[in-house]
Amino acid sequence: MPTRRTRVLTATALTAAVALALTGCGVVRDLRSGDEPEPLTEVIEPEEESPEVDPDFPYTREGTIFQDTGQDSTLRFSITGLERTDEYTVLHYEETYVDHFQGIVSNLAMPATLVDPVSGRAYAELTDADGYPYGSVPPDDGVFPVGVGATNQYRAYFPRLPDEVEQVTHVGSGLGAMTGVPVVDVDEEQADPVDPDGAGMTTRTGPEAGETVAFENERPAPGWEEWIGEMESFVDSDVSSTTRDGDTETVALKADVMFDFDSAALTSEAEGIVREAAASLERNIDPDDPEVTVIGHTDGKGTDDYNQTLSEERAATVRDVLEEELEEDLTLTVEGRGAAEPVAEEGGSDTEEAEARNRRVEFSYRVDRNGASGGDAEEGGLGSSERHVYPPAPFVEDDTAEVVDTVTDGDIRLDVHPLRRDGAYVISTVTLTNTGDAPASPDMGGEDAASPGGPTEFSQGALGGFQLLEPGTDLVRYVTLLNFGGQSFSGFAEEVHEMQPDNAYQLIAVFAAPPASVETLTLRAGPFGEIEDVPFT
């Protein structure tokens, strides 16, 4: 008998698992939820209108996916419908395993998520109060029997997408990012399967090759739990860094550039930097919420009282210059946090860099999402604060067809594919291949591959150490996070697990988009080094 496998959904992190069984597979439908985050209402409109897309289902991908037993399989994954009703969004999809698998195994892909790349919102599956998602019902103690060459039909439910969302990006199949999937408005979702042939199957009596199998469906009941998250981006430069989390932007001015040691007076170059920051703030701030909070931070050296006083004085100095530059109807509040909120961990081999990053003055405000532009960066502002929004990327069946560079590290080959602009983000797709004779678990760097003193939370996951560098500038774009609330995040990048000989695995990492004038970027790829001149497709 197959065992039941579970993963947990909490308010601070989103995880999921798919379990597979002999003669087929079993999908675990057991997600546990915590408190529901507040719904989000702001909307971003790209300057360039999205082209109309006629639905052309199915949208299909095929490739090798990681399994927890190491018996990695080739999966054909097809989205056959995406319906928006008055209550929720319904995803219809099919899975076909085209080669071997044995025993009870788990698909190690990212959780199934729908992403609006324009607004940066992410939508996870609807669950009941106990954390179990609605949709297709596993007939055999929490698993779906699947036969090699047989096609299983599934249904999953997500929060209702806003009316203005016409296309989404789907992640979670293990086959990269499926962009440009159209949303179809319907009065009523497709009827539930009548006498579904999979309802009575077990992992021992699974379907035969060539069969198409449907399962019973459980529609969402009143009181379902919604999970709506945000993509959180981080762009760094020599003088500032900018974090965007939903409709909140936080600009951090690095104190080593702004102030001399033990001083709250601006350096000779700092006043110009603050004026650039004011220009960015004025362009980005939501005019309906003109509140700006200026917060000073120090490193961990010195006493708490000393650090608290210094952080307050430095914040006040920056506030004074901002007030000279900004409209009178903006309200600026000053706070000091001392060393209580570091963004980089001190005490390690890179402690000097970490301490320098922690010495900063931040100002935080709500952004005007309707003011986003897909054009070039504007003059007079901070490059790290510019946001560039394009239409959703069209769907492509295979975004690994073109290889722009190949790098090896031992037996692991990295093929780099063209970058793709998708709304406000860039998708970097790479393929890893184990060219050796034995399974390998490559060290992709993760946190160790990040810049010295870099923010720990933006270096999570196997590809968390990947970064995009903008030629001719000092801007560094970190992997975007998926934030479903709380203090823990998941990097919007696929994990790298044990790789089987001769198998090729498609992985993605997602970053904030650069301006339209940028035609190539440098990919900093952990142990593979820097790959220059990676173009956009």
Image (cartoon, rainbow, N blue to C red):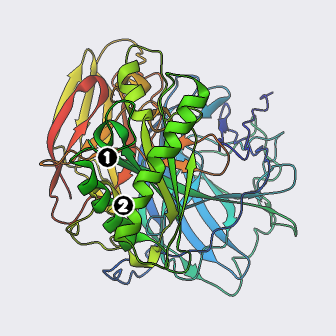
Taking the image as shown, residue 200 lies to the left or right of residue 428, namely right
Quadrant into which the C terminus falls: bottom left
Mark 2: few/some/many CA within 10 Å (<14, 14-19, 20+): some
Taking the image as shown, residue 468 lies to the left or right of residue 184, namely left
Q: Position of residue 148 (x, y in %)?
A: 56, 40
N-terminal label among 2 and 1: 1
Residue extending farthest to the bottom is 187
In the rendered image, which residue does mark 2 sit on? 321
Quadrant into which the N terminus falls: top right
When asked about the image quadrant of residue 407, the answer is top left
When asked about the image quadrant of residue 134, the answer is bottom right
Along the viewing direction, whichever of 480 and 136 lies nearer the viewer: 480
Along the viewing direction, whichever of 105 and 187 lies nearer the viewer: 187
In the rendered image, which residue does mark 1 sit on? 266
Q: Position of residue 289 (x, y in %)?
A: 56, 75
When asked about the image quadrant of residue 487, the answer is top right
Q: Position of residue 171 (x, y in %)?
A: 50, 52
Count every numbered label the image shows and give the total: 2
Q: Residue at x 37, y 77 (%)?
A: 46
Along the viewing direction, whichever of 40 and 63 lies nearer the viewer: 40
Q: Residue at x 20, y 66 (%)?
A: 516
In what element is the residue under mark 2? helix
Answer whether residue 141 is visible to the viewer in this image.
yes
Q: CA distance from mark 2 to mark 1?
A: 10 Å
Q: Residue at x 35, y 73 (%)?
A: 391
Along the viewing direction, whichever of 396 and 154 lies nearer the viewer: 396
Looking at the rendered structure, the kind of residue marked 2 is Val
Taking the image as shown, residue 312 lies to the left or right of residue 378, namely right
In what element is the residue under mark 1? loop
Residues at circles 2 and 1 in contact by the CB criterion of under 8 Å: yes
